[in-house]
Image (spheres, grey):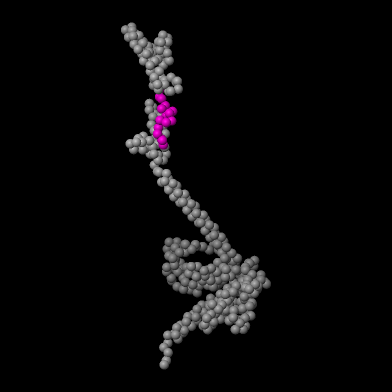
Amino acid sequence: MAAAQQLGGGGGALVAARWLGGGGGGSLRLFELLLLPFLILFLRLSSSSPGASGGNGRALPSVGSDVNECENNSICGAGSTCKNTEGSYRCDCNFGQRRDNSSDNMGNCEPIFSRAAIAVIATVFIIALLVVLLMFILLERKKRKLRAYFNRNGGQLLKSIKIDIYTKEKLDQITKNYSTIIGKGGFGKVYMGTINGNVRVAVKRCITVNALAYMHSYASQKILHGDVKSGNILLDDNFVPKVSDFGTSRLMTIGKDHTTFVVGDMSYIDPVYMKTGLLTEKSDVYSFGIVLLELMTGKKARYNGNNSLPMNFMEAYMTESRAYEMYDKEIITTEEDIKCTANVGTIAVNCLKNSVDERMTEVVKDLQIVPSEWLQILGHREHDSTEPMGI
């Protein structure tokens, strides 16, 4: 064993020692001794040939061990990663790469998408993300506005008395977009609706004055608005007025005809309320009278500095010619226009009486008479214009 190691040296000695290490008979031992010089020569030639070792002077691994070919980083082409296997290796394409099976690039990997395609996909993704983010921001802003509008218009007040509150979308669904009219009451059109699956209900759409009358007289609990003014009467897309801003509203409990601690716009507020601190439904009537004056005159409740529209109109009303001078010239062009406007002016004056008891209670009925008279006047005018002239 020792002699064999000295003759072979290095890797050759190790293999020769293993070769001669086994037992056997004498004839086999003689045969091995005859082959030993040739074996040592072969091993020395193999160990001195280029590439036999790792290229860095390391000895060859022993028989049965694995060689990691992936230590050579350039063994695989671009876009791939070397994976060592037992006795061999493989090149796996990286993420986003695929095998290039073309004849000149066999075994290499290429991108699944071109750079232009990646740029387009990334741009579309970023735009879609921005659109979704913008929609989310707009929806959140809309929700905040709805919550603020709900609270400003007495939503919490209505909740406290356990009134069922429906959103506009829910009312559209209940009435099937207001498709079935079942009548026209004193407060506006009445539509048929269905809730809870099969329970039929009547849904009323009130205009401004009707809404106030309903709040004052027909609601299960009397509700005072407390801040009726032109700025709180909104128009929808069809120019239908809506009463808004119930933030100062108060409920009138049974047995009480007034409440306190309600504030409002000083230009519209009832002077009796200012003196006594008592707010009644007649205070809303007074404020609505000022709104009527604004419609007829085209002036604000406070105009030209510090002029009071209700005070000036009440003074002018005592003289018919002066009242006419305050009417908006854009809405009165004929004698009939003056007559109808004067009727509305009379209603406004009756709403503005200093004595609460003298103020109107049936504003709705009197206002409904005005368009009827107007239609009659138009009918007579058309009849006169189409009547043939005598010779």
The quadrant holding residue 278 is: bottom right
Asked whether residue 343 is in view, the answer is no
Q: Residue at x 54, y 60 (%)?
A: 145
Residue 182 position (above or below residue 129)? below
Q: Is residue 238 magenta?
A: no
Residue 219 position (above or below residue 16)? below
Percent of width and height locating residue 123: 45, 49
Asked whether residue 131 is in view, the answer is yes
Furthest residue toward right: 275
Q: Residue at x 44, y 65 (%)?
A: 177
Quadrant into which the C terminus falls: bottom left
Q: Residue at x 60, y 72 (%)?
A: 300
Residue range of the region highlighted in magenta in the rendering: 65-80
Give the side of residue 268 with respect to residue 385, left or right: right
Residue 335 position (above or below residue 29)? below
Quadrant into which the N terminus falls: top left
Percent of width and height locating residue 52: 40, 21
